[in-house]
Image (tube, rainbow, N blue to C red):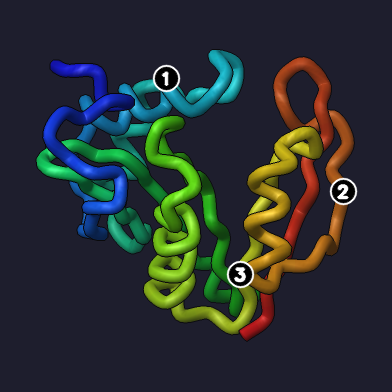
């Protein structure tokens, strides 16, 4: 497999959004390794689950035949709330609107009045994206992530 951070023959501005499925496992695994610290990467079963379990939203950004971004979400119908469970874009494809497009599409597919997500408190680029797209800070989970970093919980009401 080629290095997906540098997809040959494709402009970083040429991408589209599609549904993801189990056939995307290998590329999603690569994206996880490129986007997240080892302690934050989802293990095999979580990756497989997010691509196969019924009822989940799973979308990918594609440039050529390569996944360059991914988002997933799940519904908590009892609370009329959806959760964005992961969002990642390959480093060389950032700042082209891919994360914002994935987030907007996921919110639309979740179709819930409240959407929540959590993010490492040190992930300033992601926090800026979430605030710019209408999310507000609603909670702070201490020592949520590996190595003790806290999570910020953001919410958007539609």
Residue under label 3: 115
Give the side of residue 146 with respect to residue 39, left or right: right
Q: Which percent across, then down, holds residue 34?
A: 42, 22
Q: Secondary structure at mark 2?
A: strand
- Residue 33 image label: 1
Q: Could you tell me which quadrant the C terminus lies in? A: bottom right
Neighbour class for label 3 at 10 Å: few (<14), some, many (≥20)? Answer: many
Quick one: label 1, few (<14), some, or many (20+) residues within 10 Å?
some
Query: Mark 1 or mark 2, which is nearer the start of the sequence?
Result: 1
Rendered view: 82 above or below 95: below
Residue 6 seen in the current view:
yes
Quadrant where the image shows the N terminus: top left
Percent from the top left, x then y, of residue 30?
31, 23
Q: Secondary structure at mark 1?
A: helix
Query: Nearer the N terminus, badge 2 or badge 3?
Result: 3
Q: Which mark is residue 140?
A: 2
């Amino acid at each position: 497999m080629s290095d997906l951070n540098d997809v040959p023959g494709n402009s970083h501005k040429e991408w589209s959004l599609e549904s993801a499925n189990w056939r995307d496992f290998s590329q999603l695994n690569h994206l996880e390794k490129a986007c997240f610290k080892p302690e934050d990467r989802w293990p095999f079963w979580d990756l497989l689950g997010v691509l196969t379990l019924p009822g989940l939203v799973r979308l990918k950004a594609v440039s050529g035949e390569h996944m360059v971004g991914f988002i997933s979400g799940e519904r908590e119908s009892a609370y009329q709330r959806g959760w964005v469970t992961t969002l990642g874009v390959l480093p060389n494809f950032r700042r082209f609107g891919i994360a914002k497009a994935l987030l907007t599409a996921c919110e639309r597919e979740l179709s819930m009045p409240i959407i929540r997500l959590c993010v490492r408190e040190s992930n300033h680029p992601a926090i800026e994206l979430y605030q710019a797209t209408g999310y507000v800070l609603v909670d702070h989970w201490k020592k949520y992530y590996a190595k003790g970093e806290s999570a910020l919980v953001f919410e958007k009401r539609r």
